[in-house]
Image (tube, coloured by chain):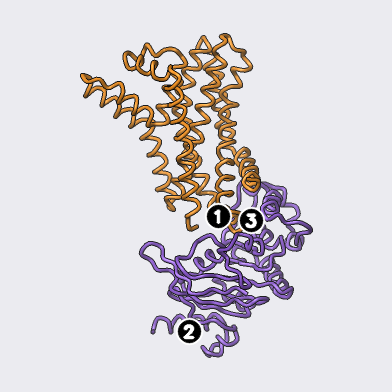
Chain colours: A orange, B purple
Amino acid sequence: MKTAMKVARYEGSNVLRSRWMLVYTLFFLAASYGLLRFAGSGTKALLSLMSVVLFLVPLVTVVYGTVYLYGAREFTELLLAQPVKRWQLYTGLYLGLTVPLSLGLAAGVSLPFVLNGFDEPALAGTLAVLVLAGVALTSVFTALAFLIALRYDDRLRGLGAAIGLWLVLSLVYDGLVLFLIATFGDYPLERAVLALTLANPVDLARVMLLLRFDISALMGYTGAVFQRFFGGASGAALAAVILGIWMAAPIALGQRAFRRKDF
Amino acid sequence: MIEVTQLEKRFGALQVLRGLDLNIGSGRVTAVVGPNGAGKTTLIKIILGLTRADSGSIYIDGKSIDADDDYRSRIGYMPQIGRFPENLSALDLMALLRDLRGAEGSVDEELVDRLRLGGELRKPIRTLSGGTRQKVNAVLALLFRPDILILDEPTVGLDPISSGIVKDKILAERGAGRTVVLTSHIMSDLEELADDVAFLADGQIRYAGTLFDLKRITRQNNLERAVAAMMTWEKAA
């Protein structure tokens, strides 16, 4: 693990010093500050910020991660020619990407709120959940970026796969769910929709956040079912476990692909 | 000595190495040559552990490289293209490699002085020219005084003066008893440096021996023509 940490430190400092990282952080800083300024209340600002985070974090993470890994291909080979084990290198590279991206997001989103002070006591908790959800999505989509970059040697195909994956999980999936609801609206679909929500990390993060805002009434009967499910201790635990699986599975698969790869 | 026996590697439908055998002598410079796609890069990558062979084995001083990863602390590798993290400096890279190798004691910075890199070491890599990056690449390969040097096109992109300095350094390393494995498309460079030549075609070694013998067998007086003659025979066969 010590070796992995050394790699992570240097890779991380390389990512932190990149111009993209600065743009990413400043963007969230500006969005957070602007929404706080003009939304009226902290809760409303957070609700809008949630949409921005859920939309952009997966996109930026998976695309930046894939492009970064292609660019680092030759250097990765040089590191592999050193006396290190592949799992150490994979862990180091993964953390070197995930940690700076998470830090940038967390700093950008929360700094304006911290400086502004929390007008409601529940706000700090909701902000923390939003940051945690953002970090979870960052770690899921960085691992997916590894899987893509290891799977396709051709950069263009890899980039296409990254954008395609984001489109599917962020837009197409929800469209299909809506289509399903509209088509089979006469049937009791709540459990099916619940299962579909758990199966997509972006949706899962969204529902967990929406329930924190206590606006599930807007989601009708489905919202009530969700509220009962996620509100209960077992439902919330299940949701957390599934988000954990969403983080662990791509990391483990990426690890396996990295170990077997012929560079 | 590096002993390669019966190495086989297939990428999908493409059989790249077909039972390749080769002995690379210690304290000598061995040039690996052959037509494009003959398997030179694959051979080097398997020795480095970047790619895994389907079958066959490689022993370094009698010890299999599959046993553990420590054998790589004896190897200095100079990849063909020196692409490094853009925002780190050459000094950062030197520190990272030193950390990873657990190297202690003094390092070999002769090339830093001779290539006049002193002023460039603290700058982010992205601000360096292609030639300067290639110089950094050479410095990194030689920094920890490894017993074995694997150099993939070491003089590409260097001006004649720097290229000469790097070649002198390679010969000095051989003089110090180090083993050097070299590929290059610049035959005059190989002619200057190589003691031995390994000619690869179609995934097998077609000739392995001294440069002198290769020229004698092919009745040519320079390496370029000798390799060309080998390639012509290869096609005729």
Observer able to see residue B87:
no
| Residue type of the residue flagged with mark 2 | Ala
> For numbered disc 2, what is the local secondary structure?
helix
Q: Is residue B237 above or below residue A257?
A: below
Q: Nearer the viewer, mark 1 or mark 3?
A: 1
Q: Is residue B194 above or below residue A144?
A: below
User: Which chain contains the residue that carries disc 1?
Assistant: A
Taking the spot 47% from the left edge, 18% from the top edge, the residue there is A48
Taking the spot 34% from the left edge, 24% from the top edge, the residue there is A194
Q: Quadrant of the N terminus of chain B?
A: bottom right
Q: Quadrant of the C terminus of chain B?
A: bottom left
Pointers 1 and 2 within a single chain: no
As measured in the structure, the alpha-carbon distance from the residue carrying label 3 to the one carrying label 2 is 35 Å
Residue beneath disc 2? B229
Q: How would you rate the neighbour count of disc 3 (Cα within 10 Å): few for under 14, some for 14-19, many for 20 or more?
A: many
Tell me residue B185's x, y (percent).
54, 71
| Residue type of the residue flagged with mark 3 | Arg
Residue beneath disc 3? B133
As measured in the structure, the alpha-carbon distance from the residue carrying label 1 to the one carrying label 2 is 34 Å
Q: Is residue B36 above or below residue A45?
A: below
In this rendering, position of residue B96 left or right of residue A94: right
